[in-house]
Image (cartoon, coloured by chain):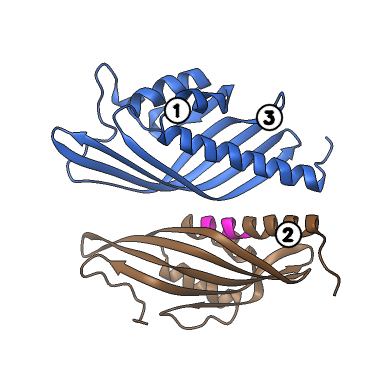
Chain colours: A brown, B blue
Amino acid sequence: MTELSDIEQLLAKEEIKLLKARRDRAVDTKDWDLYLSLHAPDHVSHNEGYPRWENAQEMIENVKQLLGPGKISVHHSHTPEITFESPIKAKGIWAMEDNIFWQQDGEEHWLNGFGFYHETYEKRNGKWLFTSRSLKRTHIRTSAGAVTGATKP
Amino acid sequence: MNELSAIAKLSALEEIRLLKARRDRAADTKDWALYESLHAPDHRSENGDYGTWHTASEMIANVSRSMANLITMHHSHTPEIEFESPTRARGIWAMTGLSLWVQGEEQHWFRAFGHYFETYGYRGDRWLFTSRRLEYHHTARSPGAVFPPKLEGQTAKSALDGR
Protein backbone atom coordinates (compact mmCIF):
# COMPACT_ATOMS: atom_id res chain seq x y z
CA MET A 1 0.00 0.00 0.00
CA THR A 2 1.25 3.46 -0.85
CA GLU A 3 0.85 5.97 1.97
CA LEU A 4 -0.95 9.27 1.67
CA SER A 5 1.36 12.28 1.84
CA ASP A 6 0.69 14.75 4.68
CA ILE A 7 -1.07 17.12 2.30
CA GLU A 8 -3.13 14.34 0.72
CA GLN A 9 -4.18 13.16 4.15
CA LEU A 10 -5.23 16.68 5.19
CA LEU A 11 -7.26 17.06 1.99
CA ALA A 12 -8.89 13.67 2.46
CA LYS A 13 -9.84 14.59 6.04
CA GLU A 14 -11.46 17.79 4.78
CA GLU A 15 -13.44 15.80 2.23
CA ILE A 16 -14.62 13.34 4.87
CA LYS A 17 -15.62 16.17 7.23
CA LEU A 18 -17.55 17.77 4.37
CA LEU A 19 -19.27 14.42 3.69
CA LYS A 20 -20.30 14.22 7.34
CA ALA A 21 -21.54 17.82 7.45
CA ARG A 22 -23.66 17.19 4.35
CA ARG A 23 -25.12 14.03 5.86
CA ASP A 24 -26.18 15.84 9.05
CA ARG A 25 -27.72 18.67 7.04
CA ALA A 26 -29.40 16.30 4.55
CA VAL A 27 -31.12 14.36 7.33
CA ASP A 28 -32.32 17.50 9.13
CA THR A 29 -33.60 19.20 5.95
CA LYS A 30 -35.04 15.88 4.68
CA ASP A 31 -33.03 16.17 1.46
CA TRP A 32 -33.19 12.42 0.78
CA ASP A 33 -31.58 12.60 -2.69
CA LEU A 34 -28.55 14.32 -1.18
CA TYR A 35 -28.58 11.87 1.74
CA LEU A 36 -28.57 8.81 -0.51
CA SER A 37 -25.85 10.27 -2.76
CA LEU A 38 -23.43 10.41 0.19
CA HIS A 39 -23.59 6.66 0.81
CA ALA A 40 -22.13 3.72 -1.11
CA PRO A 41 -24.84 1.35 -2.44
CA ASP A 42 -23.54 -1.34 -0.06
CA HIS A 43 -23.52 0.98 2.98
CA VAL A 44 -24.50 -0.77 6.23
CA SER A 45 -26.24 1.12 9.08
CA HIS A 46 -26.77 0.07 12.63
CA ASN A 47 -28.46 2.39 15.12
CA GLU A 48 -28.98 1.07 18.63
CA GLY A 49 -32.62 0.18 19.11
CA TYR A 50 -33.23 -0.53 15.41
CA PRO A 51 -32.49 -3.48 13.10
CA ARG A 52 -29.40 -3.42 10.88
CA TRP A 53 -29.95 -1.93 7.45
CA GLU A 54 -27.87 -3.93 4.96
CA ASN A 55 -27.67 -1.45 2.09
CA ALA A 56 -28.19 2.23 1.27
CA GLN A 57 -31.63 1.63 -0.23
CA GLU A 58 -32.86 -0.11 2.91
CA MET A 59 -31.39 2.70 5.00
CA ILE A 60 -33.05 5.50 3.04
CA GLU A 61 -36.46 3.84 3.15
CA ASN A 62 -36.24 3.44 6.92
CA VAL A 63 -34.80 6.89 7.62
CA LYS A 64 -37.47 8.53 5.44
CA GLN A 65 -40.15 6.77 7.42
CA LEU A 66 -38.64 7.35 10.88
CA LEU A 67 -38.03 11.04 10.19
CA GLY A 68 -41.10 11.73 8.06
CA PRO A 69 -42.81 15.09 7.61
CA GLY A 70 -44.12 15.14 11.19
CA LYS A 71 -40.68 14.96 12.78
CA ILE A 72 -38.21 17.81 13.17
CA SER A 73 -34.67 16.53 13.72
CA VAL A 74 -31.42 18.21 14.69
CA HIS A 75 -28.19 16.17 14.41
CA HIS A 76 -24.99 17.83 15.60
CA SER A 77 -21.63 16.09 15.30
CA HIS A 78 -18.39 17.06 16.99
CA THR A 79 -14.67 16.33 17.45
CA PRO A 80 -13.99 13.77 14.71
CA GLU A 81 -11.35 11.07 15.14
CA ILE A 82 -10.50 10.21 11.52
CA THR A 83 -7.84 7.63 10.76
CA PHE A 84 -6.76 6.05 7.49
CA GLU A 85 -6.45 2.33 6.85
CA SER A 86 -5.31 2.92 3.28
CA PRO A 87 -5.34 5.88 0.86
CA ILE A 88 -8.95 4.98 -0.01
CA LYS A 89 -10.27 3.61 3.29
CA ALA A 90 -10.84 5.52 6.52
CA LYS A 91 -12.56 5.20 9.88
CA GLY A 92 -14.19 7.96 11.90
CA ILE A 93 -15.67 8.41 15.35
CA TRP A 94 -17.79 11.49 16.01
CA ALA A 95 -19.40 12.67 19.22
CA MET A 96 -23.05 13.42 18.55
CA GLU A 97 -26.17 14.97 20.04
CA ASP A 98 -29.59 14.75 18.48
CA ASN A 99 -32.87 16.45 19.22
CA ILE A 100 -36.14 15.22 17.72
CA PHE A 101 -39.46 17.06 18.03
CA TRP A 102 -42.94 15.82 17.07
CA GLN A 103 -46.63 16.11 17.87
CA GLN A 104 -48.28 13.20 19.67
CA ASP A 105 -51.98 13.38 20.59
CA GLY A 106 -51.89 17.15 20.12
CA GLU A 107 -48.87 17.70 22.35
CA GLU A 108 -45.28 18.45 21.45
CA HIS A 109 -42.89 15.69 22.45
CA TRP A 110 -39.13 15.48 22.23
CA LEU A 111 -36.13 13.20 22.39
CA ASN A 112 -32.64 14.37 23.29
CA GLY A 113 -29.88 11.83 22.73
CA PHE A 114 -26.11 11.59 23.06
CA GLY A 115 -23.61 9.12 21.71
CA PHE A 116 -20.87 8.35 19.22
CA TYR A 117 -21.06 7.58 15.54
CA HIS A 118 -18.59 4.90 14.44
CA GLU A 119 -18.24 5.17 10.69
CA THR A 120 -16.22 3.91 7.75
CA TYR A 121 -15.57 5.71 4.48
CA GLU A 122 -14.21 4.73 1.11
CA LYS A 123 -13.03 6.73 -1.86
CA ARG A 124 -14.84 5.35 -4.91
CA ASN A 125 -14.47 6.90 -8.35
CA GLY A 126 -12.69 9.90 -6.85
CA LYS A 127 -15.33 10.62 -4.19
CA TRP A 128 -15.42 9.74 -0.49
CA LEU A 129 -18.64 7.94 0.55
CA PHE A 130 -20.02 6.40 3.73
CA THR A 131 -19.70 2.62 3.75
CA SER A 132 -20.98 2.01 7.29
CA ARG A 133 -22.37 3.85 10.29
CA SER A 134 -23.12 2.57 13.75
CA LEU A 135 -24.60 4.81 16.45
CA LYS A 136 -23.66 3.85 19.98
CA ARG A 137 -25.72 5.71 22.50
CA THR A 138 -24.51 6.97 25.86
CA HIS A 139 -27.83 8.45 26.92
CA ILE A 140 -31.34 9.19 25.66
CA ARG A 141 -33.93 11.27 27.45
CA THR A 142 -37.46 12.00 26.27
CA SER A 143 -40.50 14.02 27.24
CA ALA A 144 -42.90 12.18 29.59
CA GLY A 145 -45.05 9.74 27.62
CA ALA A 146 -43.07 10.04 24.38
CA VAL A 147 -43.38 7.08 21.97
CA THR A 148 -40.18 6.89 19.92
CA GLY A 149 -40.49 3.61 18.01
CA ALA A 150 -37.05 2.42 19.12
CA THR A 151 -36.74 -0.67 21.27
CA LYS A 152 -34.95 -0.17 24.56
CA PRO A 153 -31.31 -1.22 24.32
CA MET B 1 -9.72 31.95 -12.56
CA ASN B 2 -6.78 30.15 -11.07
CA GLU B 3 -7.50 27.20 -8.84
CA LEU B 4 -6.22 27.19 -5.28
CA SER B 5 -3.31 24.83 -4.71
CA ALA B 6 -3.87 22.09 -2.13
CA ILE B 7 -1.95 23.93 0.58
CA ALA B 8 -3.58 27.27 -0.26
CA LYS B 9 -7.00 25.65 0.01
CA LEU B 10 -6.19 24.07 3.39
CA SER B 11 -4.90 27.41 4.68
CA ALA B 12 -7.98 29.26 3.43
CA LEU B 13 -10.27 26.68 5.11
CA GLU B 14 -8.47 27.25 8.42
CA GLU B 15 -8.73 31.03 8.03
CA ILE B 16 -12.45 30.89 7.32
CA ARG B 17 -13.05 28.60 10.32
CA LEU B 18 -11.04 31.04 12.47
CA LEU B 19 -13.18 33.91 11.15
CA LYS B 20 -16.33 32.01 12.10
CA ALA B 21 -15.05 31.10 15.56
CA ARG B 22 -14.19 34.74 16.23
CA ARG B 23 -17.62 35.90 15.09
CA ASP B 24 -19.41 33.49 17.45
CA ARG B 25 -17.14 34.55 20.33
CA ALA B 26 -17.48 38.25 19.51
CA ALA B 27 -21.29 37.93 19.55
CA ASP B 28 -21.38 36.11 22.89
CA THR B 29 -18.83 38.38 24.59
CA LYS B 30 -20.43 41.48 23.01
CA ASP B 31 -17.10 42.52 21.54
CA TRP B 32 -18.66 44.71 18.85
CA ALA B 33 -15.38 46.17 17.60
CA LEU B 34 -14.10 42.66 16.92
CA TYR B 35 -17.47 41.64 15.48
CA GLU B 36 -17.54 44.48 12.98
CA SER B 37 -13.88 43.94 11.99
CA LEU B 38 -14.75 40.43 10.75
CA HIS B 39 -17.27 41.73 8.20
CA ALA B 40 -16.77 43.49 4.86
CA PRO B 41 -18.30 47.00 4.84
CA ASP B 42 -20.85 45.78 2.28
CA HIS B 43 -21.74 42.66 4.31
CA ARG B 44 -25.39 41.69 4.00
CA SER B 45 -27.37 39.94 6.77
CA GLU B 46 -30.70 38.27 6.09
CA ASN B 47 -32.83 37.69 9.13
CA GLY B 48 -35.89 35.84 7.89
CA ASP B 49 -38.99 37.87 8.59
CA TYR B 50 -36.97 40.61 10.25
CA GLY B 51 -35.58 42.19 7.14
CA THR B 52 -32.20 42.59 5.58
CA TRP B 53 -29.27 44.64 6.82
CA HIS B 54 -27.38 45.91 3.79
CA THR B 55 -24.11 47.01 5.39
CA ALA B 56 -21.89 45.99 8.26
CA SER B 57 -22.59 49.25 10.10
CA GLU B 58 -26.36 48.71 9.83
CA MET B 59 -25.87 45.19 11.15
CA ILE B 60 -23.68 46.21 14.08
CA ALA B 61 -26.09 48.99 15.14
CA ASN B 62 -28.97 46.49 15.25
CA VAL B 63 -27.12 43.53 16.72
CA SER B 64 -25.47 45.49 19.51
CA ARG B 65 -28.79 47.02 20.61
CA SER B 66 -30.86 43.88 20.32
CA MET B 67 -28.35 41.80 22.27
CA ALA B 68 -27.58 44.41 24.93
CA ASN B 69 -29.91 42.78 27.46
CA LEU B 70 -29.45 39.17 26.36
CA ILE B 71 -26.98 36.56 27.44
CA THR B 72 -26.37 34.61 24.25
CA MET B 73 -24.74 31.38 23.20
CA HIS B 74 -23.96 30.75 19.54
CA HIS B 75 -22.42 27.38 18.73
CA SER B 76 -21.58 26.45 15.14
CA HIS B 77 -20.78 22.98 13.86
CA THR B 78 -19.72 20.88 10.84
CA PRO B 79 -18.95 23.50 8.20
CA GLU B 80 -19.44 22.85 4.50
CA ILE B 81 -17.03 25.31 2.89
CA GLU B 82 -16.61 25.49 -0.87
CA PHE B 83 -14.60 27.87 -3.02
CA GLU B 84 -16.10 29.69 -5.99
CA SER B 85 -12.74 31.24 -6.75
CA PRO B 86 -9.48 31.73 -4.84
CA THR B 87 -11.03 34.86 -3.26
CA ARG B 88 -14.68 33.83 -2.83
CA ALA B 89 -16.14 31.03 -0.73
CA ARG B 90 -19.48 29.78 0.54
CA GLY B 91 -20.16 28.06 3.85
CA ILE B 92 -23.02 26.28 5.57
CA TRP B 93 -22.81 25.70 9.34
CA ALA B 94 -25.19 23.84 11.64
CA MET B 95 -25.98 26.00 14.67
CA THR B 96 -27.50 26.06 18.16
CA GLY B 97 -28.46 29.41 19.63
CA LEU B 98 -29.61 30.12 23.17
CA SER B 99 -30.68 33.51 24.53
CA LEU B 100 -31.37 34.21 28.21
CA TRP B 101 -32.89 37.36 29.65
CA VAL B 102 -34.98 38.78 32.46
CA GLN B 103 -38.54 39.78 31.57
CA GLY B 104 -40.35 41.55 34.37
CA GLU B 105 -38.79 39.59 37.21
CA GLU B 106 -38.64 36.22 35.50
CA GLN B 107 -35.80 34.44 33.74
CA HIS B 108 -36.73 33.57 30.16
CA TRP B 109 -35.06 31.72 27.32
CA PHE B 110 -35.21 31.20 23.58
CA ARG B 111 -33.50 28.28 21.88
CA ALA B 112 -33.01 27.76 18.17
CA PHE B 113 -31.55 25.11 15.91
CA GLY B 114 -30.76 25.90 12.30
CA HIS B 115 -28.18 26.48 9.60
CA TYR B 116 -26.13 29.54 8.71
CA PHE B 117 -25.64 30.12 4.97
CA GLU B 118 -22.66 32.43 4.52
CA THR B 119 -20.32 33.87 1.92
CA TYR B 120 -16.76 35.03 2.45
CA GLY B 121 -14.44 37.23 0.42
CA TYR B 122 -10.68 37.63 0.51
CA ARG B 123 -10.29 41.40 0.76
CA GLY B 124 -6.87 42.96 0.95
CA ASP B 125 -5.01 40.32 2.91
CA ARG B 126 -7.69 38.46 4.81
CA TRP B 127 -11.00 36.63 4.65
CA LEU B 128 -14.12 38.55 5.73
CA PHE B 129 -17.82 37.76 5.91
CA THR B 130 -19.70 39.18 2.93
CA SER B 131 -23.14 37.77 3.74
CA ARG B 132 -25.00 35.67 6.30
CA ARG B 133 -28.48 34.17 6.33
CA LEU B 134 -29.91 32.04 9.13
CA GLU B 135 -32.60 29.41 8.59
CA TYR B 136 -34.23 27.94 11.67
CA HIS B 137 -35.45 24.34 11.84
CA HIS B 138 -36.83 24.48 15.34
CA THR B 139 -37.30 27.16 17.96
CA ALA B 140 -38.63 26.95 21.50
CA ARG B 141 -39.06 29.47 24.29
CA SER B 142 -40.00 29.60 27.94
CA PRO B 143 -43.74 29.99 28.60
CA GLY B 144 -44.71 33.67 28.30
CA ALA B 145 -41.41 34.70 26.74
CA VAL B 146 -41.50 37.67 24.37
CA PHE B 147 -38.67 37.15 21.93
CA PRO B 148 -37.01 39.22 20.83
CA PRO B 149 -37.52 41.26 24.02
CA LYS B 150 -38.82 44.73 23.25
CA LEU B 151 -36.33 47.52 23.86
CA GLU B 152 -37.02 51.17 24.52
CA GLY B 153 -37.48 53.06 21.24
CA GLN B 154 -36.95 49.99 19.12
CA THR B 155 -39.39 48.05 17.02
CA ALA B 156 -39.64 44.29 17.31
CA LYS B 157 -38.56 44.11 13.68
CA SER B 158 -35.11 45.46 14.39
CA ALA B 159 -34.72 43.82 17.77
CA LEU B 160 -34.15 40.28 16.67
CA ASP B 161 -31.05 38.70 17.83
CA GLY B 162 -27.54 38.12 17.03
CA ARG B 163 -28.10 36.18 13.92
Q: Is residue A18 left or right of residue B163?
A: right
How many C-alpha atoms fall within 10 Å of the one at disc 1: few (<14), some, or many (≥20)? Answer: some
Please say if A20 is above or below B95: below
Q: Do labels 2 and 1 share a chain?
A: no
Q: How far apart are marks 3 and 2 (CA)?
A: 25 Å
Q: Do labels 3 and 2 share a chain?
A: no
Q: In which quarter of the image is residue A99?
A: bottom left
Q: Which mark is residue B31?
A: 1
How many C-alpha atoms fall within 10 Å of the one at disc 3: few (<14), some, or many (≥20)? Answer: some
Q: Mark 3 points at which residue?
A: B126
How many C-alpha atoms fall within 10 Å of the one at disc 2: few (<14), some, or many (≥20)? Answer: many
Q: Distance between the residues labelled 3 and 1?
A: 20 Å
Q: Mark 2 points at which residue?
A: A12
The kind of residue on which mark 1 rests is Asp
Q: Distance between the residues labelled 2 and 1?
A: 36 Å
The kind of residue on which mark 2 rests is Ala
Query: Which of the two labelled residues, at mark 3 and mark 1, occupies the earlier sequence position?
Result: 1
**Given the image, what chain letter belongs to the residue carrying mark 3?**
B
State the residue at coordinates (79%, 66%). Answer: A125
Q: Can residue B163 be seen in this view?
A: no
Is mark 3 in CB contact (under 8 Å) with mark 2?
no
Quadrant for the C terminus of chain B in the image:
top left
Please say if B117 is above or below A131: above
Q: What element carries label 3?
A: strand
Q: Which mark is residue B151?
A: none
Q: Which of labels 2 and 1 is toward the front? A: 1
Pick the residue in front: A42 or A114.
Answer: A114
The kind of residue on which mark 3 rests is Arg
Magenta stretch? Answer: A19-26
State the residue at coordinates (29%, 21%). Answer: B155
Q: In this view, does B70 lie to the left or right of B10?
A: left
